[in-house]
Image (tube, rainbow, N blue to C red):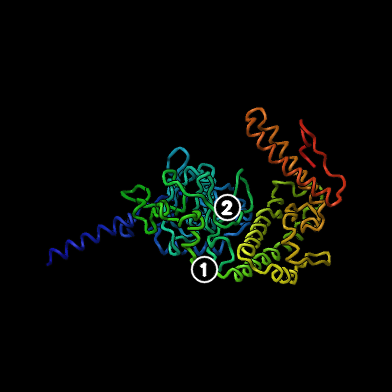
Amino acid sequence: MLGMVCRTLIFMTWVVFCWVGDSPASAVAESSDQVWQVGSRRWDVAEEQRFAAWVEETISEDFFIRYGIPVDCADVPYAIRWIYARIAHLPAAATMGDGSMYGHWSTTLAHLPTHRDWQRDRRFRAGLEYVLSGTTTKTLPTDTYPIRISPSSLLAGTVSIVPEGHAGMVGSIVLDGRMYSPVQTWEATVPRKVRKLRQRSYFSPWPDADAGSGVVRFCWPINTGGRWSYLPETEHPYYSVEQYSPGFCFPGELFDQAVARRIDPTPYDPAEKVGKIMESIHRYLQERVALVDEGFRHCQQKGRCAEGSYLWEVYSTPSRDGMIVFEIEQLLKIIKDNDLDEESFKKTMEGVLIAIGLKQEISLDYVVKNSLWLSYDPRDSIAARWGLDRCERVRSQMYHSLQALNFVEQRYRSTDPHFADNGRRLHWKDLRWLQEEGERAGCRDLPSLPLEGPLLPNSQ
């Protein structure tokens, strides 16, 4: 009996050792030269839950603008994870493009001073920059593992890797039925620069297990024998490959729909869902009022707020407007698909008013009907920003489309004529539609549409 107890205790000790990798009792020797100290702190389920809460409370569309951190899509999950790890003094690692692993323990930046505040910690900021400049969506699969799709495991801080080479991080889980998906992500695009994050409902085609795409979480760095590595994938508490199985989706169900169903299986009443989406759109519009007004005051001076500049990133609203348009599309689709009373909802929306300045109000119904004419350009007038001056908006969009078409021609005509042809076809489709809309609205001084050659100078 005593032998059995001893064997049981030995087995339990071995399991614990394998689970945590290293223990506080055998503290890892740390150097004062490393990026930051972690002591005996390690990732576990409780830390992941604290990380999730921090992401929900802290990350916003202007998070990287506030701290001057340039990002692209793959940088978003890496940066958020590393910043939290630095704040909480937890281990962090990243696989660089050359296959090497860089982490909190690295000492290559010992010449730079540290600081208690991560924002002012020059050593950490340099280390973060090194990581973000050396990682991509191709390295993310090496630093992550697939998880089971359930409310207890798909938390804020989860990473989405899309097969097409895009990535984002789950920012919140919304369980009231007002979104297309309860899983809301923060994302960015290329090129890498200081920019606003884009919020969107989770979208993804079927993931590729071999390529490492899918719904994943960051691996836990452990120290074994004085060397840092990752805890094996299968030993992480959230690990599962269920998302890759043929039975994960119902017949005819899209992958992102299956994810949404598993996180929030509630069968919402269509009319109730329409009401929630209307409330969500109204909230976005109310927040947009102050941003448009402030942008107008800062960007009317000639030469300020050029596209791609810092002020442009602060005051432009393409992401917010895109979310508004998307939610409007969902609103109209639910009404149509469920044969709801359109006239009743129209009257309700006519009574929801938004004060946009200029001693003027617009209704939610107006925005629903004219959402495509909202301008995200902070240099436009307030009337144009709210779609009230359609001609100004048409001219602005035509100039943007002509500039994009000109760029495609100059950049790709000689190197990739097939890509240039596709780009030209898409932009010409937009331009013809805009021209027709402008003529229908009686707009004057619309840009002309030359048939070939340089299309427009780089500046308006």
Pick whichever, 119 or 45, lies toward us. Answer: 45
Residue occupying image coordinates x 71% and y 53%:
316
Q: Is residue 179 visible?
A: yes
**Drawn side of residue 396 relative to residue 262, left or right:** right
How far apart, in angstroms, are the residues tagged by discs 2 and 1?
28 Å
Q: Secondary structure at mark 2?
A: strand
Mark 2 crowd level (few <14, some 14–19, many ≥20, 10 Å Cα): many
In terms of sequence position, does the residue under pointer 2 or pointer 1 come before the other? 2
Question: Which numbered mark, 2 or 1, is in the foreground of this view?
Answer: 1
Mark 1 crowd level (few <14, some 14–19, many ≥20, 10 Å Cα): few
Looking at the rendered structure, the kind of residue marked 1 is Pro
Residue occupying image coordinates x 69% and y 55%:
317
Quarter of the image for the N terminus: give it.
bottom left
Q: Secondary structure at mark 1?
A: loop
Res. 35 mark = none
Res. 187 mark = 2
Note whether 210 is above or below 168 in the view shown.
Answer: above
Looking at the rendered structure, the kind of residue marked 2 is Glu
The image position of residue 416, as x and y in percent, is 62, 30
The image position of residue 431, as x and y in percent, is 75, 43
Residue occupying image coordinates x 64% and y 57%:
326
The image position of residue 212, as x and y in percent, is 44, 46
Pick whichever, 67 or 106, lies toward us. Answer: 67
Pick out the residue farthest to the front. Answer: 339
Residue 448, quarter of picture: top right
**Drawn side of residue 379 relative to residue 100, left or right:** right
Note whether 252 is above or below 430 in the view shown.
Answer: below
**Drawn side of residue 282 relative to residue 208, left or right:** right
Residue hosting label 1:
267
